[in-house]
Image (cartoon, helix red, strand yellow):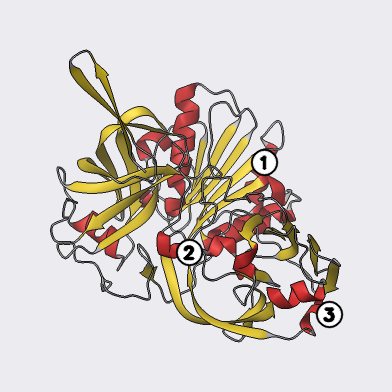
Amino acid sequence: MTQINEGFTGKSAASDDRLPPGQTQVTQWPVLSYGPTPQIDKADWSLTIDGEVNSPVTLDWEAFNKLPQSTLTTDIHCVTRWSRFGMEWEGVLIDDLIALAGGLTTNAKFAIAHSYGGYTTNLPIWDVQGGHGMIATKADGEPLTPEHGGLARSFVPHLYLWKSAKWITRLTFTASDDPGFWEVNGYNNYGDPWKEERYSDEY
Amino acid sequence: MATITTAILGKKNVTAMSISNNDWVDATVEKIVIETPSVKTFTFKLPHAMHNIAGQHYELRLTATNGYQAARPYSSASAMANSDLLELTIQHVPGGEVTSYLHSQLKVGDPIQARGPFGKFFVWEPTMEESIFLIAGGAGVVPMHSIITSHRDSGSTAEMKLLYSARTFDDIIYKDDFLAAPTVEITLTKNQPADWHGRQGRINQAAIKEILDGFSQTPSIYICGMSPFVNAVTDGLLTLGISPATIKTERFN
């Protein structure tokens, strides 16, 4: 029943099954963030894994980079409707960080990412385990620049990219959900691009 | 999700439809205003009244004959209280599949789908009393227009100033609202008419400091523009010792 826009053809093939609904493929890498870009010195950087873990741990840059490095080659999807295909991301799997912290307690249900600058985002633990998420320090072989979240960002590519926290400094496991920055500012609590979970229902 | 509530009053069926901001509605183009060579303001007639606060955005969706659809987010040009006329100011992105259609083919009377409003961060409401410094580059001025006109029309007494960077006089969007507004300062970066009395050149630390010094208290700062513009302005503010926590940014690429 949708009315047709006469003369509109569009650029993308409607049948591209690699592209989530409502997305457009881009080749450049856009930058979006809600505030100034934090500049973090390697000497000042740290990552803490705490909350519902058996032995909370804080790593400095050197210790973090000595951990086993993994790569994820994947597409990324931004809620502002662009997707970028086939990027190679490198970092430490969140599985490995959980193991380093002695494993999750039986209370753990959610992971809350906290960033330098105050950003937070919330994820169910399933989404950061089983190889689904990492703390990334490189993309396509290059260290992440500050505007793309460097020194390190969480990376959970099966969800819209706001769920991958730039400038991460702490990952806290919790028993109850705690909606993060965009989640309380009108965006969906989960953010599955294949279900187009972009915005929350406001009314 | 659309929910339809039907109440039976006597013998009459009265149907009230409640629409979520996530539901697409069928709108029609009511008016198109050419702001600059690359920017137009579209007024869309909605099937029912909506409301949004300054700074929020909507999405527009086009449908091709083969069913292919493309949607994009656009900032609302004005706050709207219980109105069925939605104003979106849209810059033509060369090669952009949606803005190219909007700018070259969409005409008054045409159908289009819209939904919203969205976003609760880069927004301003008349109940906010703090001082506000808005800084915009190019089409980044669209949400600022929404904020400036909401501030003006509500009679707000909050201190507010917009510093708007445009390339040339012809590139200034919303000339009618901005050129005489005491809350708006415009800087032209590329060239200026002979009788231009506004600012000249790119926004630099000195210009920012001069305007900051004019505030009676430290303002909250909103910045919108292309990413390099936002980076340059935020760098300038941070160098001046402004706390990053007081700065909101909205970027486009």
Residue at point 23%, 43% (across, down): B26
Residue at point 65%, 48% (across, down): B247
Q: Choose top left, top right, bottom left or bottom right for residue B30.
A: top left
Whole-percent x and y of residue A202? 47, 39
Select label 3 or label 1 by which is in front: 3
Q: Is residue B195 left or right of residue B12?
A: right
Whole-percent x and y of residue B243? 74, 48
User: B212 and A93: which one is in front?
Assistant: A93
Q: What amino acid does circle 3 point to?
A: Ala
* Residue hosting label 3: A63
Q: CA distance from mark 2 to mark 3?
A: 31 Å
* Residue hosting label 1: B212
Q: Mark 2: few, some, or many residues within 10 Å (few <14, many ≥20)?
A: many
Q: Is residue A25 above or below residue B5?
A: below
Q: What amino acid does circle 1 point to?
A: Leu
Whole-percent x and y of residue B29? 21, 42
Q: Is residue B96 above or below residue B203?
A: below
* Residue hosting label 2: A78
| Numbered disc total | 3
Q: What amino acid does circle 2 point to?
A: Cys
Are marks 2 and 3 in one subunit? yes
SS class of the residue under badge 2? Answer: loop
Q: CA distance from mark 1 to mark 2?
A: 34 Å
User: A64 and B144: which one is in front?
Assistant: A64
